[in-house]
Image (tube, rainbow, N blue to C red):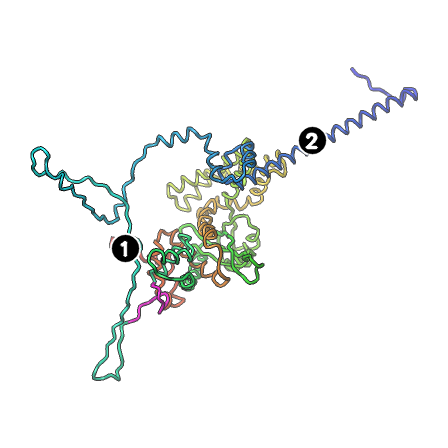
Amino acid sequence: MPVALDLNTLSEPLRAVFQSVFGERDEACQQRDEARLEHRRVEVENKLLKERIRLLLLSKYGPKAEQLSDAQLSLLELEPGVTREEVATEAAQPAREKQLRRQSAPHGRLPLPAHLPRVEEIIRVPESERHCATCGCAKCSLGHDVTEVLDLKPVELFVRVIKREKLACPRHPEAGVAMGPSPDRIIPGGKLSDAFLTDATLKKYLDHQPLFRQSAALWRDAQVNVSPSVLGDGVMAVGALLIQVNAAQRLELLAGDYLQADETPVGVQSPDAPKGQNHRAWQWQYSVPGGPVVFDFQMSRSRAGPAAFLQNYRGVVQTDAYSAYDSVIGPQMIHAGCWAHARRKFHEAHQLDPADAAAREVIERIGRLYAVEAQARAEKLTAVARQQRRQERSAMEVAALKVRLLAIRVEILPGSQLAKACNYALRIWDRLEVFLEHGQVEIDTNLAENAMRPVALGRKNWLHIGDEKAGPKIAAIMSVLATCRRLGIHPRDYLLAVLPKLGRTSTGDVKHLTPLAWHRARQAAVAPAS
């Protein structure tokens, strides 16, 4: 058993020697501890830098790159001009078994749609083969070998000549002239028909085909010269008429007790923007699953836009974690969060470190919540039944997940991507729990995000909005088209039925012409007959 050394019992020279040795030992221990701290700091910094580098490479090479290792991504950086398609090919190389299974899967030609008309083309046997080569008698018919191919006719342009009959009494000319009523049109007196303007609008905002391409196609296919500016005036006339429909849709939306909100940027040509650049404006989108979709054009992303739109609204508002909503949600509203955004943060952490079991565990736990939702959707549960199901099966999962996130956050590096994901989810945890208490609320805002995709696709094709005044008109067009899509309405049928009437419809009666009201009226008209 070691005995403690009392320096006071030693002579002065020997005491000095021991004090010197102990001092050197303490200094060495301090240097060792500092070296360990520095090594730990470098390790943490190195891990965070590797995460950032991998995140940048994934952003550069696309979603398929997440299947590649860090070594493969590093090799890609050495190759000049690597495309995303090449990255996708590289990512698919290890999946040999998947490719073989795909190749061996049974395949066949799907039948062509039965509702399309059939135009028969009879190909006769040549005269030289219609008689038997042995006896010379006429061959008898055995029917036909039938092949069906999908065919089309090029778009047929024609000039509709509208003749309004005029009648007058030859004996009493002073009685005036009677004429056939003028038909309702989108642009009275315009040279483009309602069907033409509707088609141009759908091509631009559903097919994302810029007007200059439409103009070029008209000249190429039919030698008809309709300038992009004329097409643009016509499409904006459609948008101007639909502004009042969009306003009526807003009232439909705010009359409910639940809506989702999201926003996306869009470029706008503005004299106030720097030379050669567009002003960054925003399309705010508000919608309810199975109901109206309303886009609200704003020149900024400030809280003023949603504050004005949601004024006097009472109900649940489901959003992502953008801070502008925090100051908009009043005491009469309930702020719900989005589990898809929370899960996305953990997915990004898992992408950066696929071996991290904690991130994978959280993703699997959230996946169990989505499994409950999928089953409820498959069973077509009502809002009340869905709330009960969530209380029975999801509430305990959510509570356990929160405890696990708090434990994970203590164990990991504070600046890591996984720590950021934990902080994000825990910061909005009360919002993430709202869906447990409200059966009408979805688990995420994916429906709202899906409704925003046409704006993102449009940015890549028609690039920007011509001026600030066009913003509300384009928002109205996108609102109506998105609502038609959500309700299963063919947008061409709706626009052709409603647009000509809007010019003579009072503001109070427009509520009967929204896509939702129009759809319900058609269903009611069909119901007695069926």
Q: Which residues lie in the magenta part?
A: 181-193
Quadrant position of residue 33: top right
Percent position (x, y) of residue 322? 55, 50
Q: Is residue 277 magenta?
A: no
Which dot marks residue 526? Answer: 1
Label 1: which secondary element: helix
Categorize mark 2 by other alpha carbons within 10 Å: few (<14), some (14-19), many (20+): few
Categorize mark 1 by other alpha carbons within 10 Å: few (<14), some (14-19), many (20+): few
> What residue lies at 50% left-to-right and 62% top-to-bottom?
467
Of the residues shown, which amino acid type is indicated by label 1?
Val
Give the vertical position of 274 relative to 84 (above or below).
below
Which dot marks residue 39? Answer: 2
Of the residues shown, which amino acid type is indicated by label 2?
His
Question: Which is the main secondary structure of the residues drawn in magenta?
Answer: loop
> What residue lies at 51% left-to-right and 62% top-to-bottom?
468
Quadrant position of residue 274: bottom right
In this rendering, position of residue 456 left or right of residue 104:
right
Query: Earlier along the polypeptide chain: callout 1 or callout 2?
Result: 2
